[in-house]
Amino acid sequence: MSSAVANMSLGGGRSSALDIAVQSAVADGVVFVVAAGNSTANACQSSPAGEPLAITVGATTSADARSSFSNYGSCVDVFAPGSSITSAWYTSTTASNTISGTSMASPHVAGVVALGLEIAPNSSVAQISDWITSTATQGVISDAGSGSPNLLVYSRLSATPPVAAAPTTTSTTSTTAAPSTTSTTSVPSGGGGSGGDNGGGGGDDNGGGDDAAPETTTTIARPVVTTSTVPSSTIPQPLVSTPSVRPSTALPINRIVNPLLGSQIPLVVPQAVFTPSSNKVVGNNVVLKVKAPAQSTVHVYRDGILVKSVPAAAAQAIKITQNKVGDSSFQILIVDKKGVITTTKKSTVRVQKASK
């Protein structure tokens, strides 16, 4: 359940610390809306704009064109007005100012998120994010930028948020075919199944000030196919569907660099270069130590599941709490600023005290 919205009109180069902060807050139910940045560059190259769990917002002009300064790309989720925006100003209680930047665009979307939470306060972060993008106006932005979604935020949303994805039909198909040159026989079988920029402020197209600094031939029989469909009304439709363990296949590169807590260890690990590590048990806690290059991110997997991510500076003493009594396997994955992956060998650690 989501209960809050946060806007971040800021940005810079990729920062694992900033990305992890956003991930942790989202895990606690906070919807994060962030500025795409004002460098006319790929938003995936900056933080927090490149963090997949945030709603990243690009800027448009009053003519529905992408603002000349706005970042773009697959990490952008939606666009909102960001050129020549008049709003309250800090110099007095009655002052106003007209300025431009993606820092002006993201608060528009944060406001729409707040409206959504008022309509449906029990919505999850994922539902709110889907609501923003699914109700946005499509195809009206000129020069949205390479890889960008052509979506302009729509403040009235819809009557209800989208229901979390669930199967609507179940189909069972069975096929059996016996090869023959003189006759064919088909027999039904069992089986089947279904389913770096400067984020704040910036210049604009129409003037305005600055605010914050700165993705062999064989004859075979024709099979007999039997399909049965169960109406969707007989299948439960959960409001929220969040798997406790996320699949590790088909991960986009930014999810390998910034995997989600609870996700499985990526399939790339067996091919990674190994690096040494050490560990010790203190009560119920396991303390791990590994050398990591500067500006890298260190991910700790317990029994194949991500339980903690820390910046390189904290890699000399990574404390893992709430361990089960008995043996657990630990493996550390290190991703440097260029995305190069190294890993430790899997080690078994025995904990003898229960968590308090």
Image (cartoon, rainbow, N blue to C red):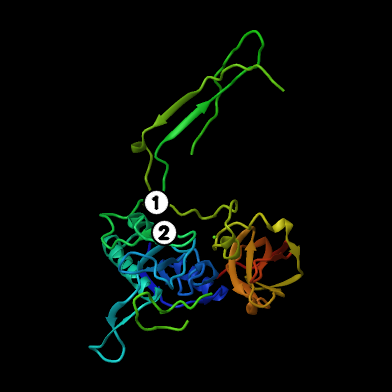
Q: Residue furthest front?
A: 206
Residue at horizontal 72%, vertical 75%? 291
Q: Are marks 1 and 2 in contact (CB under 8 Å)?
A: yes
Residue at horizontal 76%, vertical 64%? 274
Residue at horizontal 68%, vertical 19%? 218
In the displayed structure image, the side of residue 125 where residue 292 appears, left or right: right
Is 212 drawn above or below residue 25 in the view shown? below
Q: Residues within 10 Å of mark 2 (few under 14, many from 20)?
A: many
Q: Residues within 10 Å of mark 1 (few under 14, many from 20)?
A: some
In the displayed structure image, the side of residue 81 where residue 248 appears, left or right: right
Q: Secondary structure at mark 2?
A: helix
What's the amino acid at mark 1? Answer: Ala
What's the amino acid at mark 2? Answer: Ala
| Quadrant for the C terminus in the image | bottom right
Residue at horizontal 53%, vertical 31%? 192
Could you say which is closer to the camera, residue 202 or residue 199?
Answer: 202
| Quadrant for the N terminus in the image | bottom left
In the displayed structure image, the side of residue 140 where residue 20 appears, left or right: right
Residue indicated by mark 1? 164
Q: Residue furthest bottom?
A: 91
The image quarter in which residue 352 lies? bottom right
Q: Residue furthest left?
A: 94
In the displayed structure image, the side of residue 351 where residue 73 appears, left or right: left
Could you say which is closer to the camera, residue 70 or residue 266?
Answer: 70
